[in-house]
Image (cartoon, coloured by chain):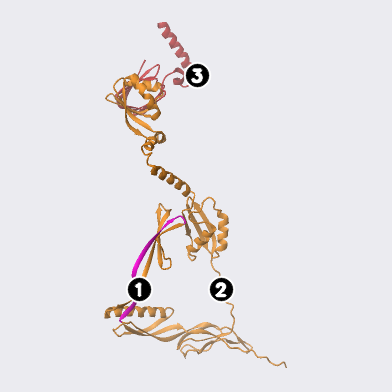
């Protein structure tokens, strides 16, 4: 198990170093979600693979490698098309968990 | 976002609610089935969202799998509106007519205005341009402006320059008036200047010819004032046309008596008719007598743009002859007004130095006036040419 984690970290490191050297955006190469925030009112998450939790106060999104959890109030998913989700509301906290 | 909303309105969409079951699973299944959702809201476990018509048909299987009950709250958009009103053919016909009217009218001239003219009436300029094709309802794009300008200038001699500006559906004709050259008098027929009235001369100024009178002389009508015979340096004489002015003090008397009954035309009946104007078409509503009618055209102007619709009010007045009895005060007042009008007309080109007006109290007025006026009048000379025998 440890060996496998080590291999994964090594692969990630290689990809990171290549993307850094070639000036490529990290999210497109390494498979992370691309998140854009407009103040604390709107969040655009690209690379969303599913909704894990949805309520007025919390929205949790599966982005593959990470789970993005947005906390706040009056949270609304304005649109969900393909792998893009636009969330509006008063965002007080953004959490990332593996 | 506005454009997106417009497209959504054109294609139609539904707002629905989904309750019970697993909301997250429902959303994930929607995403997997490529069901587009927007304006998602979760209030106390009830999801409300919008989706397009085609996606809503797929949503039933998704809701079954996630254990949610879906219900339509409201239908929005053009397809639902048309479906609701499909039996009302009038709305569709009206919409079609409105769209076609807008398309046709946007290529036409709605109003023609003339600016820059003072002496030449606008009606004359508009009449010429109407003959040449620039009128209400004419096509704005098909008009050959250069040719029309040249043709109009040929027809309108009173103008020195003109220009047609067509912006949108408004045509403005800008003109400059020509300055008329003064007429040069070439009449050299020998003539004298004689007195037109009796009077005492105060000023005599001969420009051409010989003065026969002096200031202070009393003259009667027909007396010679400036002679057309000039004596040359070599003691010979020559004939010319006498020119000059002779100001004399004259006396005039005026009388007016106002009868007790006033003859007047009294309006007996007013008949109103209307004409609907649309571009160059006039649709009369009823029979209109154009000879005795006065016309008042009203147009609709919005933000300086004259619309192609308007209405003309035709008022036809029927008069009858009437004799209105006057009270003594009114008789005096009317008499004085008529007397004053007569005096103003008579003394338009004279200077009144002294006046004495008397009233008889029954509408009669008489006045004695001393005036200063030019009494000179041209009188052609009678010249006979006789043949002289050769020596």
The Cα–Cα distance between marks 1 and 2, rounded to whole angstroms, is 47 Å
Image disc number at residue A21: 3
Residue B272 located within the stretch drawn in magenta: yes
Q: Quadrant of residue A26?
A: top left
Left/right placement of residue B129 relative to residue A34 reads right
Picture coordinates of residue B23, whole percent (x, y): 32, 21
Which chain: red? A
Neighbour tally class for label 1: few under 14, some 14-19, many 20 plus, Cα within 10 Å = few
- Label 2: state its secondary structure: loop
Q: Residue B286 appears at what percent x and percent y? A: 40, 61
Which is more toward the observer, B353 or A56?
A: A56
What residue range appears in magenta?
Answer: B260-280
Quick check: B168 above or below B212?
A: above
Between the residue at mark 3 and the residue at mark 1, the CA separation in whole angstroms equals: 107 Å
- The answer to whether tags 1 and 2 share a subunit is yes
The residue labelled by disc 1 is B320
User: Helix or strand or loop: what does disc 1 sit on?
Assistant: strand
> What x and y, as percent, mark residue B217?
47, 90
Q: Nearer the viewer, mark 3 or mark 1?
A: 1
Chain under disc 1:
B
Q: Colour of chain B?
A: orange
């Amino acid at each position: 198990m440890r060996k496998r984690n080590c291999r994964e970290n090594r692969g990630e490191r290689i990809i990171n170093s290549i993307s850094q050297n070639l000036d490529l955006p990290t999210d497109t190469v390494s498979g992370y979600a691309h998140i854009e925030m407009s103040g604390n009112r709107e969040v655009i998450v690209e690379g969303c693979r599913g909704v894990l939790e949805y309520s007025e106060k919390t929205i949790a999104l599966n982005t593959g490698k990470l789970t993005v959890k947005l906390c706040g109030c009056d949270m609304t998913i304005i649109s969900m098309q393909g792998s893009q989700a636009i969330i509006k509301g008063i965002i007080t906290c953004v959490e990332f968990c593996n | 976002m506005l454009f997106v909303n417009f497209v959504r309105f054109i294609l139609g969409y539904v707002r629905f609610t989904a309750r019970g079951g697993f909301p997250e699973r429902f959303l994930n299944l929607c995403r997997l089935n490529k069901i587009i959702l927007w304006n998602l809201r979760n209030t106390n476990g009830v999801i409300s969202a919008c989706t397009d018509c085609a996606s809503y048909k797929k949503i039933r299987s998704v809701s079954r799998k996630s254990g949610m009950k879906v219900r339509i709250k409201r239908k929005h958009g053009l397809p639902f509106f048309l479906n609701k009103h499909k039996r009302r053919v009038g709305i569709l016909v009206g919409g079609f007519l409105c769209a076609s009217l807008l398309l046709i009218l946007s290529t036409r001239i709605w109003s023609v205005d003339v600016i820059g003219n003072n002496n030449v009436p606008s009606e004359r300029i508009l009449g010429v341009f109407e003959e040449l094709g620039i009128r209400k309802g004419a096509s704005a794009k098909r008009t050959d402006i250069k040719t029309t300008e040249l043709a109009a200038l040929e027809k309108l001699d009173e103008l020195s320059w003109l220009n047609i500006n067509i912006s949108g559906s408004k045509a403005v004709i800008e003109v400059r008036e020509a300055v008329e050259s003064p007429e040069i008098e070439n009449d050299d027929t020998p003539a004298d200047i004689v007195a037109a009235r009796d009077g005492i001369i105060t000023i005599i100024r001969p420009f051409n010819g010989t003065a026969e009178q002096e200031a202070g002389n009393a003259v009667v009508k027909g007396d010679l004032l400036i002679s057309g015979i000039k004596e040359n340096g070599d003691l010979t004489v020559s004939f010319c046309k006498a020119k000059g002015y002779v100001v004399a003090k004259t006396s005039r008397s005026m009388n007016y008596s106002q009868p007790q009954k006033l003859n007047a035309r009294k309006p007996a009946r007013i008949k109103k008719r209307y004409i609907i104007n649309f571009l160059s078409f006039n649709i009369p509503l009823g029979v209109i007598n154009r000879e005795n009618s006065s016309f008042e055209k009203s147009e609709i102007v919005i933000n300086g743009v004259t619309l192609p619709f308007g209405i003309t009010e035709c008022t036809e007045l029927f008069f009858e002859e009437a004799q209105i009895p006057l009270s003594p005060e009114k008789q005096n007042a009317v008499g004085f007004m008529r007397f004053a009008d007569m005096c103003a007309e008579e003394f338009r080109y004279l200077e009144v130095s002294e006046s004495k007006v008397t009233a008889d109290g029954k509408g009669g007025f008489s006045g004695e006036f001393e005036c200063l006026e030019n009494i000179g009048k041209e009188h052609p000379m009678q010249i006979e040419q006789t043949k002289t025998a050769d020596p």
